[in-house]
Image (tube, rainbow, N blue to C red):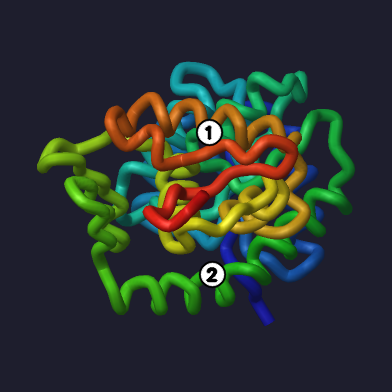
Amino acid sequence: MIKETILIVDDEEDILELVKYNLEKEGYKTILALTGEDALKLATDIQPDLIVLDLMLPGMDGFEVTKILRKDSLTAHIPIVMLTAKGEESDIVTGLELGANDYMSKPFSPRELVARIRAILRRIPIQNERSKTSDENEHTILGEMVIDHRRHIVKIAENPVDLTYSEFELLVFLSAKKGWVFTRSQIMDAIHGDNYAVTERSVDVIVAGLRKKLGTFAHSIETIRGVGYRFKDDNSN
């Protein structure tokens, strides 16, 4: 029985074949792309269930591909596992901010990659149920700030706010539970799922970026020293 379809993007053909072999051995259907441009076309035309995306691509790199995928309503929902040559935290944080679901540093274990992919695909039905619940109320209105859940748009005083995927998800998560305090691990799990392999410091980076863009609403996201963050409630102390 054929499982989900996975798009593999890498300019090294031996890596493509390695990932393809291991995924097809597990029953997944695979599609291959050598460039970012080809990846975007295939992702739009076929809408795979997941994308394994190398960062260091000729021409359009993996960051730019991710940015475009996340802004297109046809592909915004597709999980992305990034492959990084260096595994530097700056690359990981950037990928996270743009909306990657997970990452692996080269050289990597094919078995671990398959396990990560399996875990992400297993979470999708749960996340879909969660999104159905939130769609019952398509908009969250917080004074002059309006969050459009279906279209992933935030406006303040009618002016659109350009948020990354992770910034949007963080805002939705915290604002849905005003006054509740969450640890960085809880926030990371809510945005990207359990066992997301990245440092908790990444949450601080996302929060800093979000605050900068929210302007007069920046104060709504409070730092609780030694714990984490919360979205300010009028009744919070």
Q: Quadrant of residue 194?
A: bottom right
| Position of residue 19 measured from the top left corner of the image (x, y, whole percent) | 75, 47
Examine the rendered structure and indicate whether residue 78 appears above or below residue 215: below
- Helix, strand or loop for disc 1: helix
* Label 1 – label 2 distance at C-alpha: 21 Å
Q: Amino acid at mark 2?
A: Gln
Residue beneath the point at 67% across and 71% down: 122
114 or 175, which lies in front?
A: 175
- Helix, strand or loop for disc 2: helix
* Position of residue 188 in the picture relative to residue 37 (left or right): right
Q: Please give the residue where the numbered disc 2 appears in the rendered image.
A: 127
Q: Please give the residue where the numbered disc 1 appears in the rendered image.
A: 206
Mark 2 surroundings within 10 Å by alpha-carbon count, few (fewer than 14), some (14 through 19), many (20 or more) = some
Are the residues tagged 1 and 2 within 8 Å (C-beta)? no
* Position of residue 21 in the picture relative to residue 144 (left or right): right
Residue beneath the point at 71% across and 44% down: 227
Q: Earlier in the sequence, mark 1 or mark 2?
A: 2
211 or 104, which lies in front?
A: 211
